[in-house]
């Protein structure tokens, strides 16, 4: 039951772009209204933003936040959400069948981003919206003055441009559920047209084309190829999305299989990167696209039917997934995968941030940290600098089974222990993130340090417990919470004892 690796801080895999660890705020359910924005609440500041949520998001240190959707964006007209609040229309929102008052829009989002210290990643409506509307949005946000849309922003009280750099060219445009869905060549042409115009007015914009929404759609990979054949020269990145769950169809209800799902995410990254490189070759292009995994999370219980239909109401309870210990362990696995693949995946967004499939949940008086908060918070706090190349020796276990959905659990064998290490040379810190997928047994993990051996341990935490289905509630908010990880003496060779069913982080100086 021993796994091992050598950690040499000279073995660099990638320089980490912190945008990999972003999150997502959609106009959906109680995410914006009563999550982020609740004027009238004793918890709200003078702008109506919830102070407790600001403190949590700021405390996390989320580097970038995707907004305003999601499926919502494909029917959203950004002009509805700017200008005097009493003149903004209330509309019936069709992605989630909810009432949208537009009291929170782009400028409120920018204000909130400043308060929580995050960079905006805005999306265009390329569903029911036009390329022209998308370009006008960039002009509104990024042009200093002297044009129709930039002067409108100034009239709205925002003298300085918002200077938004990262933009999504639509959302999940391959999905049958998407408003204004297009075929791949149609979407690719529309995205290229919008992108080409956007570059005229905002030359430094980083533009992300919509890639496949998941790995099960029959168009998976073909969609990406056809889209990129139309727009490769005008875009910088392509999106990937996926949601995971411990269901009969995906895992047969097996937690051991479930905890291996980050390797499905890893395979998806390789497959989409291969398509990008194929089109790069076809087009003899010198440009290599990066990937934006801008929606990922566990999501399977609060899904479909009543969970996704707001019945025409304002701020309905939608997609309010309750996360347990095993979900948190898998989210730790996703963090490991994203860090490991950070040479190619530049942007990532945990979907989402508050109330809707989220690490944070509000009620009228407080905000709760769900189990998945912790592995995400650890990534934000401890993953800095460079990701190291590790050769990990670990015993494996079988996960393949007949009759499961074909796009998951494709590996035969997966390692019990999944490890990633980062090193921040400037601050002389190294961090190790460890998932022990063994449900029954503690596993030893031996690290041989080279170059240099750390002098001391600053943090050693683990998330574990006897009940994989345990979840935090407002009544019992710390049922799933970090505990100290038992530590060996610090030296050139260290043996960690990883509890059964655990995700751990150790930071060294
Ligand atoms: O994050 C919830 C939804 O999942 C998003 O709106 C959509 O893009 C995806 O299908």
Image (spheres, rainbow, N blue to C red):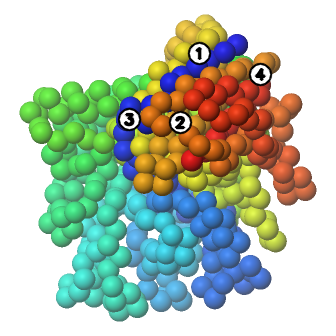
Disc 1 versus disc 3: distance between alpha carbons? 22 Å
Q: Nearer the viewer, mark 1 or mark 2?
A: 2
Kind of element beneath mark 4? loop
Label 3 crowd bin: few (<14), some (14–19), many (20+), radius 10 Å = few
Mark seen at residue 394: 1
Mark 3 C-beta to ligand 1 under 8 Å: no
Q: Check disc 2 and report its element: helix, strand or loop.
A: loop
Q: Which residue is mark 4?
A: 442
Q: CA distance from mark 1 to mark 4?
A: 13 Å
Instruction: Return the mark for residue 453.
Output: 2
Q: How far apart are labels 1 and 2 at the CA level?
A: 22 Å
Disc 3 and disc 2: Cα gap in Å? 12 Å
First in residue order: circle 4 vs circle 3: 3
Q: x and y percent of residue 423 in the render?
A: 47, 43
Sort mark 4 into few (<14), some (14-19) or many (20+) by Cα contacts within 10 Å: some
Question: Looking at the rendering, which quadrant does residue 83 occupy?
Answer: bottom left
Residue at the image position 34 percent from the left and 89 percent from the top = 159
Q: Tell me the SS state at disc 1.
A: loop
Q: Position of residue 401 (x, y in %)?
A: 62, 9
Q: Please name the residue shown 12% across and 39% down the image.
A: 286
Kindly give the residue lying farthest to the right in the view shown: 475
- In the displayed structure, 363 sits above or below 500; it is below
- The residue tagged 3 is 10
Q: Are marks 1 and 2 in contact (CB under 8 Å)?
A: no
Whether label 1 touches label 3, CB < 8 Å: no
Do we see residue 386 in this rendering? Answer: yes
Q: Is residue 405 above or below residue 503?
A: above
Q: Earlier in the sequence, mark 1 or mark 3?
A: 3
């Amino acid at each position: 039951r021993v796994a091992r690796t050598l950690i040499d801080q000279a073995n660099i895999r990638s320089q980490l772009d912190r945008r990999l660890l972003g999150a997502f705020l959609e106009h959906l359910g109680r995410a914006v209204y009563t999550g982020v924005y609740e004027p009238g609440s004793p918890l709200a500041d003078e702008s109506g933003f919830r102070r407790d949520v600001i403190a949590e998001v700021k405390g996390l240190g989320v580097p970038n936040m995707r907004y305003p959707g999601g499926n919502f964006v494909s029917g959203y007209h950004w002009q509805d959400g700017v200008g005097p609040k009493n003149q903004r229309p209330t509309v019936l929102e069709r992605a989630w069948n909810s009432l949208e008052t537009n009291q929170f829009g782009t400028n409120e989002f920018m204000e909130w981003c400043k308060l929580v210290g995050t960079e905006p990643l805005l999306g265009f409506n390329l569903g029911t919206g036009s390329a022209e509307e998308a370009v006008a949005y960039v002009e509104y946000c990024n042009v200093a003055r002297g044009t129709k849309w930039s002067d409108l922003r100034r009239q709205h009280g925002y003298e300085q441009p918002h200077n938004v750099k990262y933009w999504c060219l639509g959302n999940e445009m391959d999905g049958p559920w998407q408003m204004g869905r297009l075929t791949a060549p149609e979407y690719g042409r529309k995205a290229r047209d919008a992108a080409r115009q956007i570059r005229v007015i905002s030359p430094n914009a980083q533009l992300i084309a919509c890639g496949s929404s998941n790995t099960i759609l029959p168009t998976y990979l073909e969609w990406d190829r056809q889209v990129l054949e139309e727009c490769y020269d005008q875009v910088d990145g392509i999106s990937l999305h996926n949601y995971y769950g411990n269901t009969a169809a995906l895992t047969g209800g097996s937690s051991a299989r479930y905890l291996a799902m980050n390797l499905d995410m890893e395979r998806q990254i390789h497959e989409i990167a291969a398509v990008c490189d194929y089109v790069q070759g076809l087009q003899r292009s010198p440009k290599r696209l990066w990937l934006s995994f801008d929606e990922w999370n566990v999501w399977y219980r609060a899904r479909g039917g009543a969970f996704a239909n707001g019945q025409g109401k304002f701020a309905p309870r939608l997609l309010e997934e309750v996360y347990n210990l095993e979900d948190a362990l898998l989210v730790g696995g996703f963090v490991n995968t994203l860090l490991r693949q950070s040479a190619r995946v530049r942007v990532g967004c945990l979907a989402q941030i508050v109330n809707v499939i989220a690490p944070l949940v509000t009620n009228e008086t407080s905000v709760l940290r769900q189990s998945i908060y912790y592995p995400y918070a650890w990534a934000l706090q401890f993953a800095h600098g460079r990701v190291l190349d590790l050769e990990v020796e670990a015993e494996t276990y079988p996960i393949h089974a007949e009759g499961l959905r074909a796009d998951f659990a494709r590996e035969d064998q997966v390692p019990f222990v999944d490890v990633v290490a980062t090193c921040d040379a400037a601050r002389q810190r190294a961090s190790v993130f460890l998932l022990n997928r063994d449900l029954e047994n503690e596993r030893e993990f031996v690290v041989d340090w080279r170059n240099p051996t750390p002098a001391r341990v600053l943090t050693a935490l683990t998330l574990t417990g006897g009940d994989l289905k345990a979840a935090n509630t407002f009544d019992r908010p710390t049922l799933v919470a970090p505990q100290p990880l038992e530590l060996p003496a610090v030296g050139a060779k260290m043996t960690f004892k990883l509890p059964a069913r655990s995700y751990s982080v150790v930071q060294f100086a």
